[in-house]
Amino acid sequence: MLSPSVYGVAAMSARDTLAENLRALMASHHTYSSTPALERATEFHGLKVGKSTIDRALKGQTTLNLDYVEAIAKVYGLDAWQILTPGLVPKNPPVLRSVGEVEDKLYKKIGELAKEIVTLREGGDA
């Protein structure tokens, strides 16, 4: 079940988020676009994640321990937390930022305005 967060982003389970993001990463990286290639690359980075484990992760059928998540992330030049962030855009991965009070208010206002735009569009199309 999806529920909105404070910033208006839909929340997904970590398992579903990982599956979605892993599919996006594999689709956007020619070198590591198959499970055998990803398996070999994780082994090169120090912890082999087997093809069957990768396949189950892609289908959202299993949870992975953090060591496996980290090994997969390293293959794509990311940190583990980045591939657990909903809506990962492979060419523009999330970055950490310090949110001060003013910045927090700005992001909340942007979220409110985005919701208002959606409401206006829905009302305008009716």
Image: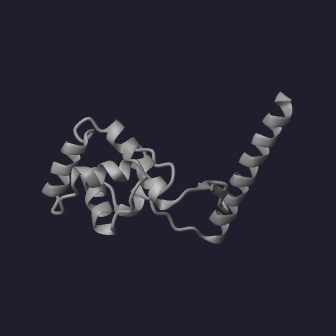
Q: How far across and down, in percent of the image, does residue 55 sit?
A: 31, 48
Q: Nearer the viewer, residue 69 or 59?
A: 59
Residue 32 placement, left or right of 103:
left
- Residue at (55% x, 56% y) in the render: 12
Residue displayed at 47% across by 57% down: 85
Q: Which residue is more in the foreground, 99 or 57?
A: 57
**Render colour scheme:** one colour
Q: Position of residue 38 (x, y in %)?
A: 22, 47
Residue at 51% x, 49% y is 87
Q: Residue at x 22, y 57 (%)?
A: 49
Measured from the top left, where is residue 106 in percent x and y? 68, 59
Q: Quadrant of the C terminus?
A: top right
Left or right relative to 68: residue 116: right
In the displayed structure, does residue 2 sit left or right of residue 48?
A: right
Quadrant of the rendered structure where residue 48 is? bottom left
Horizontal arrangement in the rendering, residue 74 relative to residue 86 (left or right): left
Considering every residue shown, the one lying at the far top of the view is 125
Query: How many circles with numbers are drawn on the protein?
Result: 0
Q: State the residue lying farthest toward the bottom.
A: 101
- Residue that extends furthest to the left in the rendered view of this protein: 44
Q: In the image, residue 54 lies at what x, y percent?
A: 29, 51
Vertical placement of 76 versus 103: above or below? above
Within the image, what quadrant is residue 118 found in? top right
In the rendered image, which quarter contains the N terminus?
bottom right
